[in-house]
Amino acid sequence: MTRIGILTGGGDCPGLNAVIRAIVKYAIRENWEVVGFRHGWKGIIDNDFLPLNLSSVSGILPKGGTILGTSRTNPYKNKGDVDKVKKAIFDNKLKAVIAIGGEDTLGVAARLAKEGVPIVGVPKTIDNDLNATDYTFGFDTALNIATECIDRLHTTAESHNRVMVVELMGRHAGWITLEAGLAGGADVILIPEVDVSIDEVCALIKQREKRGKTFSIIAVAEGARLKRFKEKDITLDGEKDAFGHSRLGGVGNVIGELIEKKTGFETRVTVLGHIQRGGTPTAFDRVLGTRFGVKAVELIKVGKFGRMVSLQGRNIVDVSLDEAVGHLKTVPPDFYEMAKIFFG
């Protein structure tokens, strides 16, 4: 009997359970067995898995997070872990493994595929920064949450004549911040792709004051950078994860203090953080995750490994894992220039 494995790696993301459910239901319809490895690549390294059946996925469609658990484990970090991954796949007689994750998880999948491991990738990230797909599931949910929070900040900002700085997720790509800022009517939007000086930000706030607007909303991505600022990235601590990433966070507080000092406006900072990752996925993310899961099983059926499922227009297609992780999809300059029409 055909047997396949599933893992979810990296940060948790709304819609992960929709993908797992789709894979399991479709695979069982084909009389396949499915096992889920716990906590991402760590589960394969430790050969820690559980069988997945119709009961396992019953009722999980609207749930956030992942029933398999996740981690930021990198098999290429510690000697011998890659061999353990290959051994677990062989010992469990798996036809293929479906890796659901972002740039790091799928980067590992791409390397393993080059070494002959039968792998199919499913793109997952709230940042929407994976190349070769128009959207990743999780982004729409995070975007809607961020937009609602900005909507709520407007009323308190106006009531107290304050500047409200809201820090959103986005290490290298500002998709959430830019689109939530546009949808929520933010007065200034700062993203990692474009360096902006604090003087430019304060000038826009003062410009609003001249028009009688005594409050402002500043949307800031966690990876945003200020011109001529001594720190390239604002981090929570000096630690790095298994893929070499620092824990970003705190840029909102830095910007808030500078705004208050330079403009005299009382300034408050809100950091949404993991609120953007949590909770029930939107209908869009449930449907997209379901379609991705079905396509992943179809790729295994025809033996197309080393591929990632992708949304292009309205169609679900497949692309090479190398293409998907070759470089990040960042906000194009013309999109940001359009957004600047609404600054101030």
Image: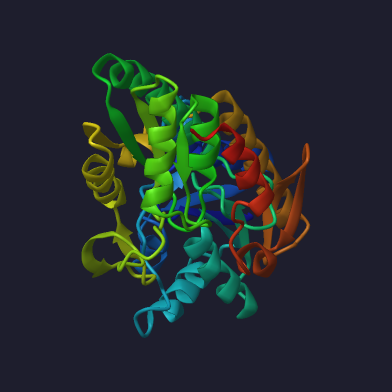
Give the mark count.
0
Residue extending furthest toward the bottom: 79
At 70% from the left and 50% from the top, the residue drawn is 310
Above or below: residue 93 compared with residue 36 = below
Q: Position of residue 212 (x, y in %)?
A: 40, 19
Residue extending furthest toward the front: 210
- Seen from the viewer's position, the closer of residues 23 and 244 is 244
Is any part of residue 222 visible from this angle? no
- What colour-coding does the image apply? rainbow
Residue 67: image quadrant is top left
- Seen from the viewer's position, the closer of residues 30 and 83 is 83
Q: Quadrant of the N terminus?
A: bottom right
Q: Position of residue 336 (x, y in %)?
A: 60, 46
- Seen from the viewer's position, the closer of residues 127 and 173 is 173
Q: Position of residue 52 (x, y in %)?
A: 47, 43
- Seen from the viewer's position, the closer of residues 119 and 244 is 244
At 24% from the left and 18% from the top, the residue drawn is 160
At 68% from the left and 49% from the top, the residue drawn is 334
Above or below: residue 282 compared with residue 74 = above
Above or below: residue 178 compared with residue 265 = below
Q: Position of residue 168 (x, y in %)?
A: 39, 42
- 185 lies left or right of 226: right
Residue 82: image quadrant is bottom left
At 32% from the left and 41% from the top, the residue drawn is 273
Is any part of residue 343 visible from this angle? yes
